[in-house]
Amino acid sequence: VVDGVFAVAFTAGQAAIAWFAATALLTAADGAPPRAGTDGLPLALAVLVAAGAAALGPRTLPAPVLRWRPWVTGALALACAAWAWPGDPAAWAGTPLAPSGLTPDGALWLALAALFFAGVGWEAVTGAAPATAAGPGRTAAGVLLGTAAVAVVYLGLAAVQERAAPGPAPAPLRWALAGATAAVLASYVFTNVRTAARIAARLYPGGRRSAERGPARSLVVAVGAACCAFAWAGARDGGVPLLLLGPAAAALTGYALGAAAAVRHGGPALRCAGLLLVAVLAGLAVLGVPALSGA
């Protein structure tokens, strides 16, 4: 079940990443984000097509690049926050990144969806707790470490942006930040298209063995086509946050299934914690989806 939801969610997530890259480049031109519509669609599709074509080939990113990429991404995010780029979030209303008439409550749910999307990757921080032979103490330490890392990163970026220099960034700096952002995001699309195809390969008999050798080219093409279809859907007013609901729903599904397993097979304390987590996740879904869809 988790493989199934993540295979679909990853395609929606890559479409959202491609829209972020396209918006960064278009915003660098005049300092204003593109309005809702198809202005950014050709650029978003170009990012997806280029990344998908690269994913069809045999090449992979070198290990040092993969090892340093998260640090480069963090430094780039810090630079964007320090220069308050791409500008005041209030100006994003009426663009693919935020719907028109966004209320403070809607902005809160928008941020929550983005955090769930980011959490798909940040969960890797819990690797400090080994996946096998990890007792309750090590597992709890890994979870707490992941939670602390996410909190420090996002609260730190928020604090930097709060103290950012007023006024728009100069054009050369806008283009430098936009180009770096687009390059980093495109590299993530390249690796994530393969990841989505590898996850999808595990859904059919014998797929797990073939996924270890690499996904079939036809599966990579299918994943790329799905990404492009989702990118087209993201052109609407506030469409990109709705794309983020895909990875958010996949993360919620995984957490809910883990909590349900705890309720079925755990001790009294674990059962109570599992029931509480299931209730919280269900409540988040009931409250969040209508707010993001404008209902």
Image: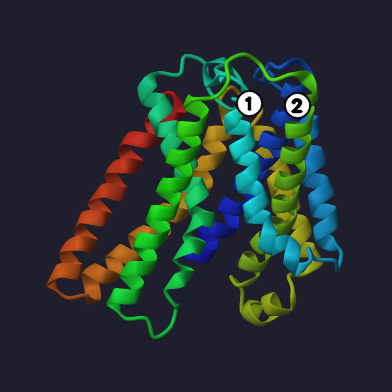
Q: CA distance from mark 1 to mark 2?
A: 10 Å
The numbered mark at residue 85 is 1
Residue 40, percent from left and from top: 74, 27
The residue singled out by tag 2 in the image is 173
State left or right for residue 237 relative to residue 255.
right
Answer whether labels 1 and 2 touch (C-beta < 8 Å).
yes
Give the residue furthest to the bottom. 133
Residue at 63% in and 54% down: 70
Residue 51, percent from left and from top: 79, 51
The numbered mark at residue 20 is none
Report the amino acid beneath label 1: Trp
Q: Which quadrant holds the C terminus?
A: top left
State left or right for residue 131 relative to residue 203.
left
Badge count: 2
State left or right for residue 38 relative to residue 147.
right
In the image, 11 versus 137, the foreground residue is 137
**At numbered mark 1, what does the secondary structure look like: helix, strand or loop?**
loop
> Which class describes the residues within 10 Å of circle 2: few (<14), some (14-19), or many (20+)?
some
Residue 189 to residue 27: above or below: below
Residue 223 to residue 243: above or below: below
Residue at 21% in and 75% down: 266
